[in-house]
Amino acid sequence: MLKKIKKYRFMFSELVKRDFKKKYKRTVLGMGWSMLSPLLHLLVMKLVFTQFFGRNTPHYTTYLFAGNLFFSFFRESTNGGKDALLANRDLILKINIPKYLFLLSKNVSALINFGLTLIVFFVFVALDGIAFSPKFIAILYPVVCLVLINVGVGLVLSALNVFFRDIGYLYDIFTQLLMYMSAIFYRVDAYPAEIQRIFLINPVYDCIKYVRVVVLEGNIPSLQYHVLLLAYASVFLIIGCVLYKKLNHKFVYYL
């Protein structure tokens, strides 16, 4: 895969540029929406949920922002991956290039948006009175794990979406449910220990919790927690690659 990306690196870079420009085409603020959009979502969620969940939560704005930031990254990446093949149907049928390049370009574009918003997140961390620490560099770990999860999930969705167009509708419902199960605006420690362990089944929540532990508590999660995230990233990526490779030769017949 890496060899093919290197071989088609010019086209891959053009796909990333196209996806990034297309997202903000004919908008007044352009790239500014990468930062403004999550801020507006944060404002709405803060106004709605502060009175219900934020009264007893220290640094609730940062707590809320961390959850919204990582979940939005997951949603944008996987939704883009889901539609990557169908949206590029004409190019795929005309040019013989690795089809996963379209999916990876969507993920890179989402990663750029995430990086821009992450800068704003750290500004809010400072404004919230949280001292910066060298431990913050550990945040790169859940980011890398989530990127691999996004690619794996995207590979599965893009492949299945070619054959079953219902996937798009079902995934919208699933992401809505997943958002409520990711503890973005409420605290999990209010539940019994058995319920808290159930939340660990959700890898998006695990990434969010990792960041909150580092930023809000000033600690590094345990070795077991690192292994858990790596296991999720590996499993999703392997499943995605295997399924995608198995169905790859059939795509042109259903596009």
Image (spheres, rainbow, N blue to C red):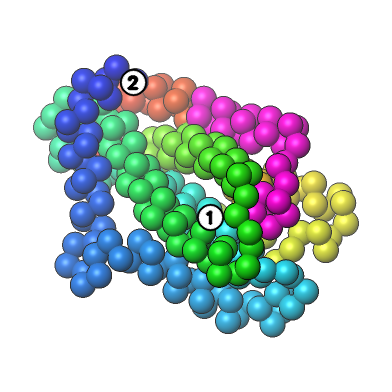
Residue at the spot 57% in from the left edge and 37% down from the top edge: 141
Give the side of residue 58 with respect to residue 98, left or right: right
Q: Disc 2 and disc 1: Cα gap in Å? A: 27 Å
Q: Is residue 206 above or below residue 91?
A: below
Magenta residue check for 232: yes
Residue at the spot 25% in from the left edge and 43% down from the top edge: 16
Mark 2 Cα-neighbour bin, 10 Å: few <14, some 14–19, many ≥20: few
Q: Is residue 170 above or below residue 143?
A: below
Could you tell me which secondary element the residue under label 2 belongs to?
Answer: helix
Earlier-in-chain disc, 2 versus 1: 2
* Residue 179 falls in image quadrant: bottom right
Please give the label number shown on residue 2: 2
Residue at the spot 70% in from the left edge and 42% down from the top edge: 220
Q: Position of residue 8 (x, y in %)?
A: 20, 25
* Residue 40 falls in image quadrant: bottom left
Of residue 219 and residue 143, the one placed in the foreground of this image is 219
Three-letter amino acid code at the position of disc 1 = Phe
* Residue 11 falls in image quadrant: top left
In the image, the segment drawn in magenta is 211-239
Give the side of residue 212 with respect to residue 55, left or right: left
Quickly name the residue at label 1.
71
Q: Position of residue 124 (x, y in %)?
A: 53, 66
